[in-house]
Image: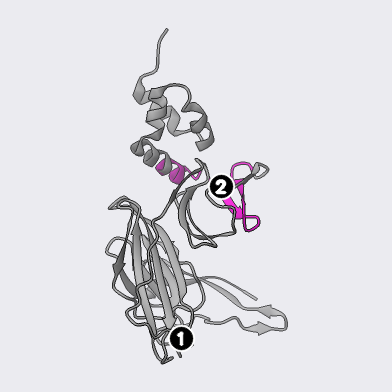
């Protein structure tokens, strides 16, 4: 009886869903090792992104569990429970099917809802150089993938008012999944107030920030996951910084930066009120 070559088998497996791949790991030791191989995982992820398949929407149902909705079949919905904790959790970020989560004990872990695999991150202390803290620290996160080093990174920024409201105590750290450790990086020179979690675009994490504590003007700052440096990006000249309420309605403008880092490339895509 003719058998398929290993290369042809891999090509067939690349087109299957994660659910089917997990089932077929039981076929043989060779299939199991092939499906678990990091190179195959990258191929499967790349194919899914190119073909816009194997996508699921993860929704937090309560504080304790999630709903997974299959994009290919919206009627296919299942409840999935996060690992390692029975306490409420928050999502710190997501990238390539991985979720960065934190529970109410400040334990952080990475979780793949498709494979149910997870990893607890090592803890790291807050290292303010001054003890003159007059308010509880605020913590901000961002999670993303850096393709050149093939590494997933989690950014944590902690800020707190000092005795003088004109400045903040601050520190920034980066966790690397490849090295499984935290490193302190250059402290930030801006002020975060609202959005706790950064959004990923162009291999960089982004937050809306203020250059001074008293400022009402928001600025867009990015963190390059490769160089691990912060940089400001210019917003369009006319960009609504606040919601303007008009008889129970509000004005919303959606802007798109067509060329990353180029101010002139901003275009207003949608506007409604």
Judge whether 152 appears above or below 208 on screen: above
Give neighbour class at mark 1: few <14, some 14-19, many 20+ (Cα, 10 Å).
few
Colour scheme shown: one colour
Residue 18, percent across and down?
50, 37
Residue extending furthest toward the front: 131
Seen from the viewer's position, the closer of residues 229 and 188 is: 188
Q: In this image, 189 relative to 60: left or right? A: left
Residue extending furthest toward the right: 247
Q: Image quarter for residue 207?
A: bottom left
Residue 134's disc number:
1
Judge whether 200 appears above or below 217 on screen: above
Of callouts 2 and 1, which one flags the residue occurring earlier in the amino acid sequence? 2
Q: Image quarter for residue 36?
A: top left
For the residue labelled by badge 1, is the local secondary structure a helix, a strand or a loop? Answer: loop
Q: In this image, 250 relative to 227: left or right? A: right
Q: Image quarter for residue 13?
A: top left
Seen from the viewer's position, the closer of residues 51 and 123 is: 123
Residue 243, percent across and down?
60, 80
Could you give the CA–CA distance between mark 2 and mark 1, rounded to whole angstroms? 43 Å
Residue 56's disc number:
2
In the picture, the quarter occupied by the N terminus is: top left
- Magenta stretch in the rendered image: 46-73
Q: In this image, 255 relative to 189: left or right? A: right
Question: Is residue 205 something that shows in the picture?
Answer: yes
User: Going 69% across and 78% down the picture, which residue do you hit?
Assistant: 249
| In the image, residue 32 lies in the stretch drawn in magenta | no
Question: Is residue 261 something that shows in the picture?
Answer: no
| In the image, residue 53 lies in the stretch drawn in magenta | yes
Residue 205, percent across and down?
40, 65
């Amino acid at each position: 009886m003719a058998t398929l070559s290993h290369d042809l088998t891999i090509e067939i497996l690349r087109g299957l869903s994660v659910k089917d791949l997990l089932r077929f790991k039981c076929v043989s030791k060779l299939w199991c090792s092939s499906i678990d191989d990091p190179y195959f995982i990258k191929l499967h992820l790349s194919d899914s992104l190119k073909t816009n398949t194997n996508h699921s929407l993860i929704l937090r149902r309560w504080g304790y569990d999630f709903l997974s909705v299959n994009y290919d079949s919206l009627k296919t919905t299942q409840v999935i429970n996060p690992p390692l904790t029975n306490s409420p959790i928050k999502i710190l970020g997501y990238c390539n099917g991985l979720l960065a989560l934190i529970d109410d004990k400040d334990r952080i872990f990475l979780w793949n809802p498709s494979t149910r695999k997870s990893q607890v991150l090592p803890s790291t202390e807050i290292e303010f150089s001054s003890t003159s803290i007059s308010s509880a620290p605020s913590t901000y996160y961002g999670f993303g993938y850096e393709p050149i080093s093939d590494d997933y990174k989690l950014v944590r920024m902690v800020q707190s008012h000092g005795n003088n409201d004109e400045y903040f105590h601050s520190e920034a750290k980066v966790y690397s999944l490849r090295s499984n450790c935290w490193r302190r990086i250059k402290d930030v020179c801006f002020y975060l107030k609202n959005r706790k979690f950064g959004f990923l675009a162009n291999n960089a994490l982004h937050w809306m920030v203020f250059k001074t504590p008293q400022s009402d003007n928001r600025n867009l700052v990015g963190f390059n996951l490769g160089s691990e440096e912060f940089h400001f990006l210019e917003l369009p000249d006319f960009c609504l910084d606040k919601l303007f309420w008009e008889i129970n309605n509000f004005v919303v403008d959606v802007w798109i930066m067509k060329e990353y880092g180029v101010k002139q490339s901003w275009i207003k895509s949608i506007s409604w009120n």
